[in-house]
Amino acid sequence: MLEFIQSIADENRRNMINEMCTLYYNRMLTYAKTILKSTHDAEDAVQDAFLKIVENQDLIIKDVRSSSTASLVFIICRNSSLNLYNKIRHRNKVFTSLDAPDVMEGLEPYTEQDDSLTELIKNEDRKFIARVIGMLEQKYHDVLMLSAIYNMPYAKIGNIVDASESVVRNRIHRGKIKLRKLLDEEKKKEEGKVNG
């Protein structure tokens, strides 16, 4: 891992990755082992996760120790681990289910420039929204966090979650629908506590 970090040309980026490695490597390794059940495979997954962080130069990480950075690191680690798990599991098969288009019937059209989630977050309490996003299924949680919090384009999100751009768009669209329903339900629960 040290050689990998030393190979990063930009000194600021190299120092940031080095600090992230110091802070998160052991926790990421433990987390990856729970998915992969192998120390060797977990090390590969963690290295792949750091490689994805380095490759995505547009990731602006202001505070390496912040909770948003930690959640980004673990989203990338989990997806690297799951991707490796799937590669190992289906080593001799062509594995295309991540790129298979989901059923699109009954969905409203959406565009790359859809800012409805960003507007929703601006109008709501961020802690409340983060808590509700945390209630969503992991596949929706990850893409919504990467899209709304980190303003990543669909192609970059697809690179991190190992899915095609069309699958990412579909997950974001479905995730927003589920998020709006959950927000309404949670607001009603909170209003019931206040009034009840």
Image (cartoon, rainbow, N blue to C red):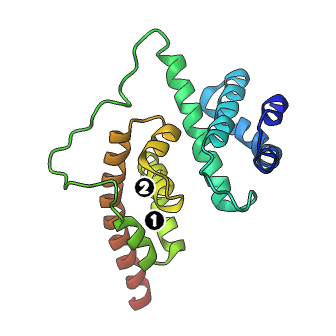
Residue at 60% across / 44% down in the picture?
56
Residue at 59% across / 51% down in the picture?
58
User: Badge 2: how crowded within 10 Å, few (<14), some, or many (20+)?
Assistant: some
* Above-or-below relation of 43 to 19: above
Residue at 33% across / 54% down in the picture?
112
100 or 152: nearer the viewer? 152
Expressed as whole percent of the image width and height from the top left, the position of residue 176 reads 34, 59
Numbered label attached to residue 93: none
Rounded to the nearest angstrom, the CA distance separating label 1 from label 2 is 7 Å
Outermost residue on the top side: it is 92
Q: Is the residue under label 2 in contact with that under label 1 (CB below 8 Å)?
A: yes
| Residue type at tag 2 | Leu
Quarter of the C terminus within the rendering: bottom left
Q: From the viewer's perspective, tell me whether residue 113 is left or right of residue 8.
A: left
- Residue 73 visible in this rendered orientation of the protein: yes
Expressed as whole percent of the image width and height from the top left, the position of residue 147 reads 46, 56
Q: Give the structural element (helix, strand or loop) at label 2.
A: loop
- Residue 33 visible in this rendered orientation of the protein: no
Residue at 19% across / 56% down in the picture?
108
Number of disc labels: 2
89 or 77: nearer the viewer? 77
114 or 190: nearer the viewer? 114
Expressed as whole percent of the image width and height from the top left, the position of residue 57 reads 63, 46
* Above-or-below relation of 93 to 32: above
Q: Give the structural element (helix, strand or loop) at label 1.
A: helix
Q: Quadrant of residue 124?
A: bottom left
The residue that label 2 is drawn on is 136
Expressed as whole percent of the image width and height from the top left, the position of residue 69 reads 66, 56
Q: Quadrant of residue 9?
A: top right
The residue that label 1 is drawn on is 132
Q: From the viewer's perspective, tell me whether residue 175 is left or right of residue 52.
A: left
| Residue type at tag 1 | Val
